[in-house]
Image: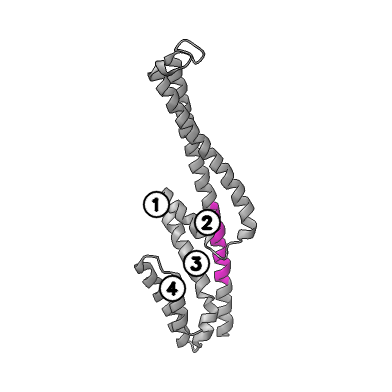
Amino acid sequence: MNRAMFLSELRMGLSGMPQSEIDETLADYEAHFSDGAAAGRSESAIASALGDPARLAKELRAEAGFKRWETERSPGSMVGAVIALLGLATLDLIFLIPFVCVVGAILLSMLVTAIALLFGGGAVWLFALFPGWIMFGTSGVLGSGAALALAGFGLIAGGIGLGALTWLLLDIFIRGLVQYARLHFRLIDSAQTNSAQTGRD
């Protein structure tokens, strides 16, 4: 593979990213080829040392997604980081899928419970505000309006607390996956560096 083919495949793999990031990345890899050529290496040897451009593009897109999540910490950037993780071919998904599924199921159940608590608390508040809606009356089984208001407040507070805990645990979980992926990047980069040094020797 020569310089033009490598950079063309890399550009295709990076499509969808901001144009400024694509241009900057391509300029970096142009510099790799220029430096290698100045050292007397062939374009095919340089391309081989750099690795598969399609896989490289996936790693670069993943890193961009990780950085957006780290700077924004929003639900949208978190979804982007998860998609970047799933699209990363170098991640050992075969071993991680069962773990991710279990943790995802736990976090999802916590989120559903938090939402149920919020809606339940809201419903109890409505019963407290409009006691005529209560089947058993304000002095019946469900208690007085004041007791209902306190119960509704407790349910809503519990839902908010559980939702905040879910978000915190999800943040920690994704941060761990990102660190794992970046460790994998470092191992790959090290292997590429060794290949490049071997090619120069």
Looking at marks 4 and 3 on the same chain, the residue that comes earlier in the sequence is marked by 4
Disc 2 secondary structure class? helix
Q: Are marks 4 and 2 in contact (CB under 8 Å)?
A: no
Q: Where in the figure is residue 49, as x and y percent of width and height?
A: 54, 79
In terms of image quadrants, where is residue 105? top right
Look at mark 1 in the image and give the residue it sits on.
Answer: 72
Looking at marks 4 and 1 on the same chain, the residue that comes earlier in the sequence is marked by 4
Say which amino acid is labelled 1.
Answer: Glu
Whether 109 is drawn above or below 40: the answer is above
- Which stretch is magenta? 176-190
Whether 122 is drawn above or below 132: the answer is below
Which residue is pictured at 55% across the width and 52% down the height? Answer: 176
Q: Where in the figure is residue 117, as x and y percent of width and height?
A: 49, 31
Look at mark 2 in the image and give the residue it sits on.
Answer: 178
Which residue is pictured at 52% across the width and 47% down the height? Answer: 172
Q: How far apart are the alpha carbons under marks 2 and 3?
A: 14 Å
Q: How far apart are the alpha carbons under marks 3 and 1?
A: 21 Å
